[in-house]
Amino acid sequence: MSKRSMIVELLQGISTDQEATVKGWVRTKRGNKNVAFLALNDGSTIHNLQIVVDLPSFSSDLISSITTGACIRATGRLVASQGKGQSVELQATDLEVYGTADPNTYPLQKKGHSLEFLREIAHLRPRTNTFGAIYRLRHHMAYAIHTFFHQKGFFYFNAPLITGSDCEGAGQMFQVTTLDLANCPKTEEGAVDYSRDFFARQTSLTVSGQLEAEMAALALGGVYTFGPTFRAENSNTPRHLAEFWMCEPEVAFNEIEDNMDLAEEFIKFCVRWALDHCIDDIKFLAEHFDKDLVERLESVLEKPFVRLTYTEGVEILEKAVADGHKFEFPIYWGADLASEHERYLVEQHFKTPVILTDYPKEIKSFYMKLNDDDKTVRGMDILFPKIGEIIGGSEREADYDKLRKRAQEMNVPEKDIWWYLESRKFGTCPHSGFGLGFERLLLFVSGMANIRDVIPFPRTPKSAEF
Amino acid sequence: MSKRSMIVELLQGISTDQEATVKGWVRTKRGNKNVAFLALNDGSTIHNLQIVVDLPSFSSDLISSITTGACIRATGRLVASQGKGQSVELQATDLEVYGTADPNTYPLQKKGHSLEFLREIAHLRPRTNTFGAIYRLRHHMAYAIHTFFHQKGFFYFNAPLITGSDCEGAGQMFQVTTLDLANCPKTEEGAVDYSRDFFARQTSLTVSGQLEAEMAALALGGVYTFGPTFRAENSNTPRHLAEFWMCEPEVAFNEIEDNMDLAEEFIKFCVRWALDHCIDDIKFLAEHFDKDLVERLESVLEKPFVRLTYTEGVEILEKAVADGHKFEFPIYWGADLASEHERYLVEQHFKTPVILTDYPKEIKSFYMKLNDDDKTVRGMDILFPKIGEIIGGSEREADYDKLRKRAQEMNVPEKDIWWYLESRKFGTCPHSGFGLGFERLLLFVSGMANIRDVIPFPRTPKSAEF
């Protein structure tokens, strides 16, 4: 068995007039009585390698078994291509079929398919150009995240997914249990007897690893989490998933300005990486889904993000309303901004990404550092064109008494956060962090419109197939 | 506020006789009436920077608030150190205390603590030398994994954690639900009415992302997962966690020999990375927990792993028994190997890591490729000194009919794996993969004995604190 070459390397066209073996899946087959042209894709790139098959040299049974979707090995000579659109092609001297794909049943024939249909065959959609491009982008964005933080001396920190408490109050949680639901053990008072559950307590899937990451930052300096998080919200929208990925850096000694600097540098690093490493995939996605994609990606790199306070943002939005702009949701100081408000600021007013800071304490979490005005907290959200909020973060409350008071005001049970509070009792310091919704980033760099299309097997209400 | 330098960089001693600012946590304080020496750690390295404080220049209140565990900023001049054991020290000109640590209540005073006690304060244990070293190692091993596969052109692929089926039969699973356990909805027949659960079906936490990763490999070529997996097994041992991390590469066109080559290259890459990037942390851990650690790490790099079949392995073990060696568990062809058997082969017989292949089909999963003998499958386990099995994998059954038959024989419901079977109907090909238990790797490179000490917040039966 000869060693296979990756098509992405062969297409660089450096080593022509050499013997090569490629293995992959046939995308199309065309030709005439004497010659067949197979477009072969091995997943290493969006581009296919053209395999030229001199038909008289092969058995007709073999050739007729090679149809769209079949998996084959082709060995032959790599030569400069005469045809348009490719640098090299392979003149096959030997062909082997690993697996056929019956044209009557294989669902991915040549013609285009709707994204909705492809979600129903999520096990096969990686074989399409679109999802090949998206999954390669997804890999590259994950690798960019690890590279960025590693180069800065941060440590990857794995917060637990199964948690005994709902500290953040960030939303509905999934319960994790080994109890028999059909016959749940009860206490004498008739409540569920969690002492008999696996962890001898009620447990859920985490909504954020931030609180645990803070414990690590207050010892290691800079850390980041990157992994799945969960929301049991019954939101059937193109922007919500029940299981999604988040990246949450947490940094000792960073104050809110440092946090903004880090977040801006981070997201620009990721977008730059996408343009530098995935331009062929991005161009394909731009052509098919979002004509302005490349320009939009380049535009966020051009200049510093605009930074302003929530209060200033609300003033701009109130003025827009006074000038006749219609929003669906009312805007006033104290209101949580809706996506339409965020996008107005970014797309219409500033025409550049925006960092909003200093939100009313009532609409943010208990752990955000209270400003001296006693009304606002040092939260920050980064708002992006087309996406709205892509990053949310804050300087954390480092003062034990203030943090405890805020937790009480927001009804966070002290029994759930005794350990978190304790970090402010022993060697506390200013620190900050933020969370990036990974699929939001992927929507931005891929130009896709539905979050179900940027994660391999989406989990949404009433859907956990595969 | 002056910009802080990381202690790991200052200790390289390149830029002495310069002003510098460091921020970190005080490990110890000693000295006399005129001068205090603070050992400051900022988490960037296991080594502390010595801060020399000329006491008459500072208020005694400030100085007395700086005790073990306090978090401070120190600004001053970095000079070559006169003392033993450090290259440079900082002569403080300005000190700021961010957070004190009351000596009467701060649990991490100078004296050593048992690992058991430190597990009870998992939120503070990152501030110890031991856990600083372990978490830095954990970061580096994760980064090595991403680097290895990225350089090979593999793509990081995120399989879902919430799954609708128990395909692997790899063990007990945690149920994920939003149903009210106290008042569970029932069908007319009295069963739990899962149509009213969040996903409108019964769902669990995954035991492996392999089957989904195969779908990606059969399109993208080489992929790998790396993330949390779950087992709801009531195993209170130093080797088991309910939530642990796995790395699972899956590669199209790789046969069992390629799979062994990849796994051996991979794990040697990781161990080499640990020695190259974490030697100070490893030496600390060796000194305190495992004197032979460095030699053991170097030993696995020295030569190719021994490869033999399960059948040959059993023969060696049976001969050992015949020669008088006592095992706790019986050994015979068809038996699953116990840890004592694996370690005998590695530590006593071959004295080098071992790859065992071709196991009896009855003790392996349905998806492993059946050998022509119809008795054994192309599974492979890598056995390591001290650890036992660190990697398990196989060539996958690529033939639709054989795979379907094996699934039936092993009682895997076809309704759960229709999509997995379908991948063998359309463009199937030889492919292989394996799973690395990430915490097993960490036990190996850190020399720690209990798996609860190589993950930040361990989840075990009756324990989900923090």
Image (cartoon, coloured by chain):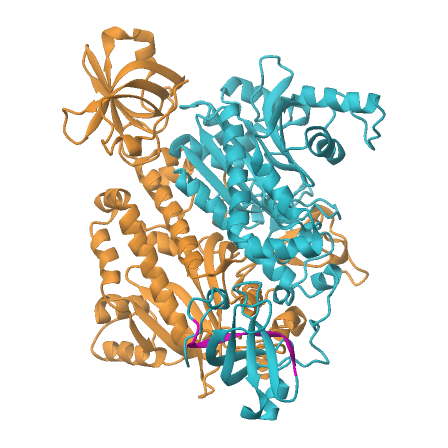
Chain colours: A orange, B cyan
Query: Count the marks: how many?
Result: 0
Q: Going by the image, does B174 lie left or right of B333?
A: left
The reply to whether residue A237 is visible in this rendering is no
Residue A280 image-quadrant placement: top left
Return the x and y of residue A327 as percentages of the image width and height.
29, 70
Give A301 or B117, whichever is nearer the viewer.
B117
Secondary structure mostly seen in magenta is: strand
User: Would residue B91 be seen by someone viewing this image from the given angle?
Assistant: yes
Q: Residue furthest front?
A: B82
Q: Nearer the viewer, residue A427 or B169?
A: A427
Residue B252 position, x and y percent, is: 44, 28
Q: Image point 63% across, 23% down: which residue? A: B308
Name which quarter of the figure residue A52 lies in: top left
Q: Write the residue at 71% across / 34% down.
A: B347
Quadrant in which residue A29 is drawn? top left
User: What is the x, y in percent for residue A464?
Assistant: 51, 43
Identify the residue at image location x=17%, y=32%.
A85
Please state, as top left, top right, bottom left or bottom right, where the N terminus of chain A lies in the image: top left
Q: Nearer the viewer, residue B214 or A427?
A: A427
Q: Looking at the picture, how far across and down is residue A219, in whole percent?
A: 57, 68
Q: Relative to B204, does residue A363 appear above or below in the rendering?
A: below
In-image side of A12 versus B178 (left or right) = left
Q: Residue A429 lies in magenta, yes or no?
A: no
Q: Which segment did they paint magenta?
A: B16-31
| Magenta residue check for B25 | yes
